[in-house]
Image (tube, rainbow, N blue to C red):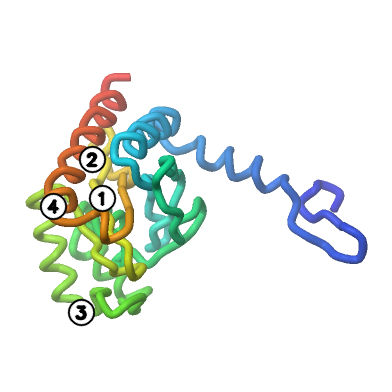
Amino acid sequence: MKYDFVVKEGDEYRLGLRYLDLGAHVRAQIPGSSEIKHKLRDLANETGESAQFAVEERGRTVVLYREVSHGGVYSRGRVGRRFHMHQTAAGKAILSQYSDHWIHEIVDRHGLPEATPHTITDESVLFDELTEIRERSVAFNSEESTEGLRSVAVPVTGAEGDVLGAFAVAGPTHRITGDRFETEIPDLVRSIVNELELNLAYS
């Protein structure tokens, strides 16, 4: 209570807002965090959906930033939420940049638990999909983490070629479908990620 990490209200205790300050400090340590926020806002506005930037920590996907357009839907992917990497488009996009050895380590540590009937639960199927993601530079998620929700993600790499995280766009299946799901949104996300990577490389 002395440092406002816990606040007493009447007879009850709750976590204090001091954690907001800590969280903002932690996020600011990510390279290019200011540029990432601006590009994420552009992505949400242009797609009319929810846009996220996620990173990997200890073999899990963590949502660092999220922007939701006026017509976008809020999903479970709130800031700070952790997901199994194989369940999300962002997680698979990040995994695609890792060595097979490190991917095996993550799977051995966390397994491939099922979130919906569409979740990949077979390691060989996951590796096949990661090969496809490397070839097309985009990852797809069709109701694998949340039923009724689809997402598209592209990995973001730093100036040294290291993976920083992934940009993702998510929306309801009735809006993200057909060419919009397979071509339009992937092309837009790749374009914005390319601009971001150039800005990070030459800033």
- Inter-mark Cα distance, 1 to 3: 21 Å
Earlier sequence position, callout 4 versus callout 3? 3
Front residue of 35/25: it is 35
Of marks 4 and 1, which one's residue comes earlier in the chain? Answer: 1
Residue 184 versus residue 98 in the image, above or below: above
Query: What residue lies at 33% left-to-right and 41% top-to-bottom?
Result: 48
Q: Quadrant of residue 56?
A: bottom left
Question: Dot 3 corresponds to which residue?
Answer: 122
Contact, mark 2 vs mark 1 (Cβ under 8 Å): yes
Q: Tell me the quarter of the image containing the C terminus.
A: top left
Using the numbered discs, state the Cα–Cα distance from disc 2 to disc 4 in whole angstroms.
Answer: 12 Å
The circle drawn on residue 153 is 1
Disc nearer the start of the sequence (1/3): 3
- Residue, disc 4: 182
Q: Secondary structure at mark 1?
A: strand
Q: Residue flagged by tag 1: what amino acid is it?
A: Ala
Gap between marks 4 and 3 measured at Cα: 24 Å
Toward the right, the furthest residue is 10
Query: What is the x, y in percent for residue 45?
Result: 35, 35
- For this view, does 22 lie left or right of residue 193? right
Q: Horizontally, is 41 left or right of 81 in the view?
A: left
Residue 111 in sight? no
